[in-house]
Image: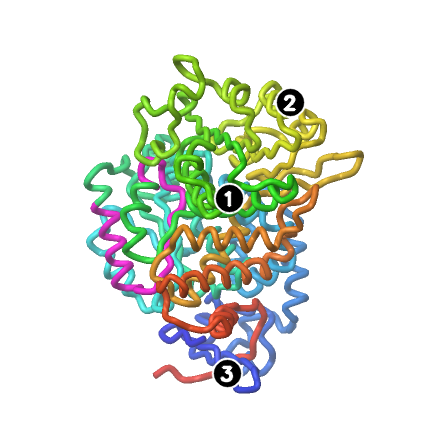
Amino acid sequence: MSFENTGYQIITDESGYSHIEVSLSDYVLITSSLLNKGVGFNEQERDDFSLHGLLPPYVASIEIQRQRAYRAFLSKQTALEKYINLRDLQDANETLFYNLVFTYLEEILPFIYTPTVGEGCQYFSHFYRRPRGVFISYPNRDRMEQIFSLPCFDHTEVIVVSDGERILGMGDLGAGGMGIPIGKLSLYTSCAGIHPNTTLPVLLDTGTDNPELLNDPLYVGWHHTRIRGKEYSNFVDQFVQVVKKRFPHVVLQWEDFAHHNARTLLERYRNELCTFNDDIQGTAAVVLGSLLSAIRVTGSSLKEQRIVIVGAGSAGCGIAHLLKQAMLLEGASELEARRRFFLLSSSGLLFEDMELLPFQREFAQPRSIIKKSGQISLYEVVHHVHPTILIGACGKGGVFTQEIIREMAAHVKRPMIFPLSNPTQLSEAIPQDLMKWTEERAIMGTGSPFPEIMKEGKPYKVDQINNAYIFPGIGLGLIAVKAKRVTDSMLIAAATALGKCSPQSETNLLPPFSNIREVSFEIALAVAKEAVHLGLAEQMTPIEIEKRIKRKIWEPVYLPYRKVKRD
């Protein structure tokens, strides 16, 4: 990998031996998070780069440094303290950070992303220390092209962008929403091996309507209420046009935009560049992959299911749309597939005679489906429909009550139940309750991590239906072949690949997260092949696709440094 204009490049000879040629030295070198090795610099490197005296004399391997970092992580008492500790390490030494995360991935994941990232975003301004990523505030909109022109961004291949308006289930956190792009991109590297120097977190700071932030003197964002309407639309469009010009092959991922903007932005730009919304499409793909595994346990097919989704926002409708597309591939007609879905908003079951958002109309039911006027509750839907699958994406804790679950279980041999809202306190149900209320017949997955539960007298770990299973692999595949667009068929290919990697057992629907690198590779391969098949990437053989993906995978280990002079 050559990273010109960043002070270094990775050189690999014909035998596969790699080293890094570096033009930086002394404090400039050890304050570069991408190049710093800390006490991992050997004696020759300390001679060559003028590091003697700037570091303790002890030379340690990355394994010893990892032990020290892990002990520091364990010493922190609260989840937020662990999150801050890991962010500090990332800003100081990225190679060590990713080496630590990859070694203890399942243990550390909840502290670099959900559920702790939500709290990290809440207090982002209170522990802000070092710059990371790009903040584009509305007053700086005319400087956008200049900001992105910096040479340090020359090698950007994937951007995750948020405006901070709908952070998880916590609402408007303004500039603190930058924690989401930072966390997502950390998973791109940890789970798929995408080099951190090719990732760029972006926060579009359009103000905040959160009064606590506006009155907080420590708040680092633009102290202004959110811009709306045409001003907002023009600002985002300006950003997209600059990105298209500056990074013609970039993958642009949208994160945590409010419902009224998320779908609109996706539909507006999905045919202009290689872009997707993880809340809508990534969530849908990982749910589809999990359901394909669950359905095989039941011995049925997807097109036979009756699916109730609580939460008819962008995530819930995104899940329904992708599941419907997969049903069509199984041979269902459009009308047959649509009649399999029952979506509920805060106003109850969606009916065709209601005032609905454009993306909700696809799944509105005729009034004749349940012969009752007025609002139809979740219990009434479950009572009349007898769903085989119940999905929660409403961000309201406890809405899957004992009465509702027992009614579902009374009519279905193996109820499939997925309370997906996060963080944990917003989950629609607690797994142990679901197991109890279904007489241990439920097949389930959750959006947040939960402790082990008991089933048949034995401890059992419930799968977290985590987007980290899917989006890093999707990104890796798109980047490797420089795909021009992201299509539904690519997402279905990703979900199918995930399903094939799954154990499809009575207890677990997803592969162990310790296998995430292998899973991400298989997903990347499936997505890349589909992009080539559709003509949305240059034509190449499957062998060449595989080689390109492998060339994009970075390992967090120290390589030898050689001093070169800057031109």
Label 1's element?
helix
Residue 202 location (% of width, % of height): 36, 53
Q: Nearer the viewer, mark 2 or mark 1?
A: 2
Give the mark, 3 or 1, whose residue is nearer the N terminus: 1
Residue 172 in sight from this viewpoint: yes
Badge number at residue 562: 3
Badge number at residue 117: 1
Q: Which of marks 3 and 2 is in front?
A: 2
Image quarter of the C terminus: bottom left
Residue 261 location (% of width, % of height): 31, 39
Give amino acid for label 1: Val
Start-end of magenta stretch: 234-262
Give amino acid for label 2: Ala
Residue wearing tag 2: 410
Badge 3 local density, few (<14 within 10 Å), some, or many (20+)? some
Taking the image as shown, residue 324 lies to the left or right of residue 304, namely left
Q: In which quarter of the image is residue 522?
A: bottom right
CA gap between label 2 and label 1 equals 38 Å
Badge 1 local density, few (<14 within 10 Å), some, or many (20+)? many
Q: Which of marks 3 and 1 is in front?
A: 1
- The residue at 42%/43% (across/down) is 280
Badge 2 local density, few (<14 within 10 Å), some, or many (20+)? few
Give the mark, 3 or 2, whose residue is nearer the N terminus: 2
Give amino acid for label 3: Arg
Taking the image as shown, residue 440 lies to the left or right of residue 365, namely right
Q: Does the magenta stretch include residue 258?
A: yes
Label 2's element?
loop
Q: Indicate whether 54 appears above or below 431.
A: below
**248 or 498: nearer the eye?**
498
Q: Residue furthest bottom?
A: 14
